Amino acid sequence: MQPELLISKKPPHALYQLASACRGLDKQLQSWAQHWLKSHAVITKYKQSHDTQPGRRFLTGKHGLLFWIKRRCVFCGKQTHRSAILANGLRCCIACDQWQWPDKITKTQAKEEYDLREHHLFPRYHHHPSYAKLAKLGIPSGIIVPRYGTCQVDNVMTTMFLLSDVQRLAEAIHGNYEMYVARRKREAQDREETGAGGEGVGAELDASMMQAEVTVDELVFGALLSGGDTLAAFMITSPPTESNNANTSAAKLGKRRHSGEEAVASPHKKIMTDANGGTNGAGKLDVDGITVPVEQLKRQALADGNGEIDEGLYSRQLYVLGHEAMKRMGSSNVLVVGLRGLGVEIAKNIALAGVKSLTLWDPKKARIEDLSSQFFLHAEDVGKPRAQVTAPRVSELNPYTPVSVHEADSLTGDLEKLKKYQAVVLTDTPLKDQLKIADYCHENGIYVVVTDTYGLFGTIFTDFGKSFTVGDPTGENPVSGIVAGVDEEGLVSTLEETRHGLEDGDFVSFTEVEGMTKLNDGTPRKVKVMGPYTFSIGDVSGFGMYERGGLYTQVKMPKIIDFEPMSTQLKKPELMMSDFAKFDRPAQLHVGVQALHEFAEKHGGELPHPHNAKDAAEVLELAQKTAKTLEDKPDLDEKIIKELAYQARGEISPMAAFFGGLAAQEVLKSVSGKFHPIKQWMYFDSLESLPSSSPRSEEECKPRGTRYDGNIAVFGHSYHEKVTNVKQFLVGAGAIGCEMLKNWAMLGLGSGPKGNISVTDMDQIERSNLNRQFLFRPKDVGHLKSEAAAAAVQAMNPDLKGKITVLKDRVAQDTEEIFNEDFWNALDGVTNALDNVDARTYVDRRCVFFHKPLLDSGTLGTKGNSQVVLPRLTESYSSSQDPPEQSFPMCTLRSFPNRIEHTIAWAKDLFHTYFVGPAEIVNTYLTQKDYLSTALKSSGNEKQTLETLREYLQTEKPESFDDCVEWARMQFEKQYNNAIAQLLFNFPKDSKTSSGQPFWSGPKRAPDPLKFDPENPTHYTFVLAAANLHAFNYHIKQSSDKQHILSVLDRMIVPDFKPDPGVRIQADDKEPDPNAGNGAMDDDEALEKIAQGLPQPKTLGNFKLEAVEFEKDDDTNYHIDFITACSNLRAENYKIVNADRHKTKFIAGKIIPAIATTTALVTGLVILELYKIIDGKTDLEQYKNGFVNLALPFFGFSEPIASPKGKYQGPNGEVTIDKLWDRFESEDVPLKQFIEDFKKKGLQITMISSGVSLLYASFYSAAKLKDRLPMKMSDLVEHISKKKIPGHQKNVIFEITTDDETDEDVEVPYVMVKLRK
């Protein structure tokens, strides 16, 4: 029976009702927060496991929504403490701020530049239903009040508006703003001249301006969409000519031209595009159904740049080209002629690279076969001028590169128009026009590149004029080193730790040489290499006697190259070799291509019909006639010339990618002077890619009226059907992945009824990706790469809709339940597009296991490679290894740095020591039960860990940001004064080694302590960054208030330092560490005292430190700022030349330099190998591994290395096995039967293992084997390893060691035991 108390009829107390309501409300809020975190898992990293975590608070908990919002960018989820300017209370990283609100303007600028008043910007009655008061204030009805937010700029709270809103408001209030400004200016002038209003003159000016278009900027403001937030007009203008550079300089900086400047009417065409790439009056750009505020992005790019390079966008490219080369590119105007597949590839790469302007010309109407390689054309564009529909889509690629259409019916009609360009690229142009334009460009100092592709053939020609200067022929970093000696004959000896790395003909300069001080005059001296550690610099008589010290640094000397005009080179070509296995091919193709042009001229501009014998015979006859006119008459191979004719009408994407990357790089070389150009002709073909298992005939290759006719013309319809039914897996959707998907879309790969493309990439798009990963746009920043890339290529080729499986998981051991056996077995092949060696190695191992062909590729700046891995034929990616990363001796880093790389490595280690390691130790102590008595004692580092806990939880625990500033100042003193003073106390500057040599010589540079100077920017930055990162650890509000920080520093008292005679410092890595073993001698009583003094975890509640996660690409998080300041201060200690922030970020962040041209070219090589795999070729000689360096330029191709073979003696004689691809397969039988089965093969098993578990050994005792022999192999693995085999796993791998029939130990493949499930 229930107690009477529980069934009382009295109504509950009001507080109970309140508590019940609060509990219900809390539950709803927690549920809502959980739903939000889950639905935005891409940026919040919410996992399914979080659903079942007991007691998890999804709103206010440690990892709840409010906690997340305070520390993460609300758009991409990146860790940041930067406030969102136009969304107060939220966080927003720089990249997302520029993506979300690309154009902003301060209140002061809005007032001054747009003549607005306070009541215009902040109308008090904008919410009132009546607009009468608004009208009195001068604000028309219907105007949206400008959106604004506040932020701190230089410690001043600043109000920021959206520029588009301010412009709309100004247009609404003043009408046409430019005319308004001009009228006011003229009226003011008239008033000054006449003392009157000048109304008549102003009216005349206003009327004249209404009739003529006034160009205010390179990017003209267009009509505004009613109620829209972005500029509606998409304007494309050509770059300014020399005559109006003065007028457009302000425009390049994003400034509006003042009314006093001369107004120049733009002669360039304006284009407004509709959703299909056509033109309409609405002026709204909508490419592939996605509205893009292109004009807004362009103005932001120009305005934000202020003439400087946007390192956020171009960071990876900057590490290839350098600032100077990119600035020269940024002042160059380029014309690209012909916009089929090759032309658009060149235009794409040049636009991404970032030139001053890019102009396109191709008035020809798009044809259906163009869609085989022209990825910016759609089916609905057929019949429209190529340039008109292509230009808007190229313009989207880079807001810093304005794109225009060259206005001329004929290029050769008025060659004077070419003078406004620094470089001209010709594709799809008749030979007679090529000659006329190229010779004109040669005479007028315009760089010219001529390139074309014909099926699997391609050609390129360059002419950069007379005395072309190459500032850096190789692009390699200058080598440097330490001088060990210089004799009287000029023989320089270097330290024998590293080779000098110089070559004959290089130049070097010297610094810090004592004795021969004349060597320090900076004169570059020519080198003759005498050995790996010696080189000669010639006569040094009169320079004195070398005493000691000195550094040498390679000096890059410019190279002068003379180019001949095309008309001369056509008759006597200078041919560059692209494939040394085809030594006689370039000369034949030089003649063959001329024959094609002659054929086209005779047949109304039409090339030979696909695989037409009559047309091919005519081309051969023309080629033979042309060959006779050359000084060096080539021997023509009839098959080669006819094949060229057969394929002439075909244009395929991989050849367009190869020559598009190559030609674009040549253009960039011409305008930047960076890297050695092609001189002057290069031909390349990949006839090995032709199918041998599919028919090719005139009937097979004839056009079908489809988008794939360009491919069919080369390969035939039957082979094309094979391509469409391939199931291919792409691992990675970055730079190479984007290019790969684009090429696959043009091929129609996987678009057939049996075909499919699977693509996976776990990364999100960052702003720096936009410079190379051309499928992405600013709107995609923060989204998954795999999803955005798949959507983009489906828009390029609608046949792929429903044919792409998008995944967002990395391919690794922990995702084998996703990428399981069924997944791998369903594939026809795999393509790697990864920049991570470990990931590439794992995918390679899976391909070997499942016997799948693999195409791997990679780039490093201008260098690239491609590798084909074929089951049972070639070695795999993992068969060879790259050299290990460079590492430095710890002794060098701790005490004796001599290069900036040493100080950067030391600084990054200090970053971890300060802001990562201690936080992790503290959190482990707070969360791991009995940490001090268990894990710590077994770590072997007890004293240091206890001291860290005491420092971060007791003695140095900050309570405010001021405490963090004081901590940072003391760290400066500790690292840059005290530690150096201690080092000099142990090793004074005049100390000697045991052999009597000066201790501070060779690689050891004597340091000097630093005295803190708050006015020194590097000193202050160290304190600022260190204090803010320390505050981040403790969840203390960060600050950049310089005056406040200086006041804290000013009141500090820093104690004097006295060196400790008991401190021992290791002098050389070859010597034993004098401090080694000290931990074992620690006083247990002292350690116990520290441990007892620590606060107990339960007394600290929910307190935890926040470990800093190193992020190199966020310029607001102080990470690179700290490492740069930290490194340069140490460099200042040791008199090492400092590195700027850009270089420090490159080294500390281990950034892989990248450029779009190399990526495009390498991807083209990969696709050429894919053709062979789809055809099923088994002859290794038909395959090519490629190696390129566009800087030199160099092209090398080699036959893949065959997989290693082995032999053993079986019962029936010698057995040959493939050591890589072969394996034994067995059912899940008992161990005893397993051993017996191998005896039948002539192999006596001596040992069996699986993973780290040893399951059987011939030396095991009978008692030990008694229980194991009857057990099935799967049961034996689980029994020994104490782990269950995962349910998704269908096999277990065993490694065995065996003896053969001759009792010889033989190496045999692994064994795969199949599990029955």
Image (spheres, rainbow, N blue to C red):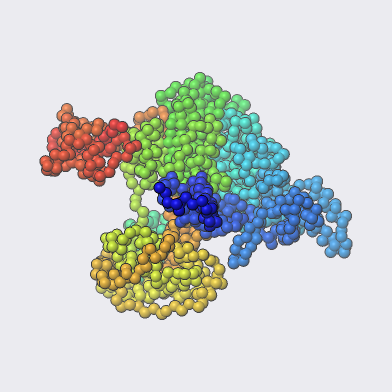
536 or 1244, nearer to the observer? 1244
Q: Classify the position of the C terminus by image quarter.
A: top left
How many numbered circles are shown? 0
Task: Tell me where residue 575 appears, x and y as whole percent.
Answer: 47, 40
- Residue 1027 placement (x, y as % from top left): 48, 67
Is 958 rendered above or below residue 455?
Answer: below
State the residue at coordinates (56%, 52%).
96
Towards the viewer: 210 or 728 = 728
The answer to whether residue 156 is visible is yes
Rendered view: 382 above or below 1022: above
In front: 1068, or 849?
849
Please name the residue shown 78% across and 52% down the image. Answer: 131
Residue name at image x 48 percent, y 26 percent: 753
Q: Residue at x 41, y 24 (%)?
A: 693
Q: Residue 1293: percent from the left, percent from the top?
A: 27, 38
Question: What residue occupies the far left of the structure in this picture?
Answer: 1262
User: Is residue 986 found left or right of 855 in the rendered image?
Assistant: left
Q: Is residue 333 left or right of residue 951?
A: right
The answer to whether 576 appears left or right of 1283 in the picture is: right
Q: Position of residue 1140 (x, y in %)?
A: 49, 62
Residue 908 in view in this figure: no
Q: Is residue 824 above or below residue 228?
A: above
1044 vs 1158, nearest the viewer: 1044
User: Would you identify the image quadrant in which residue 1230 lies?
Assistant: top left
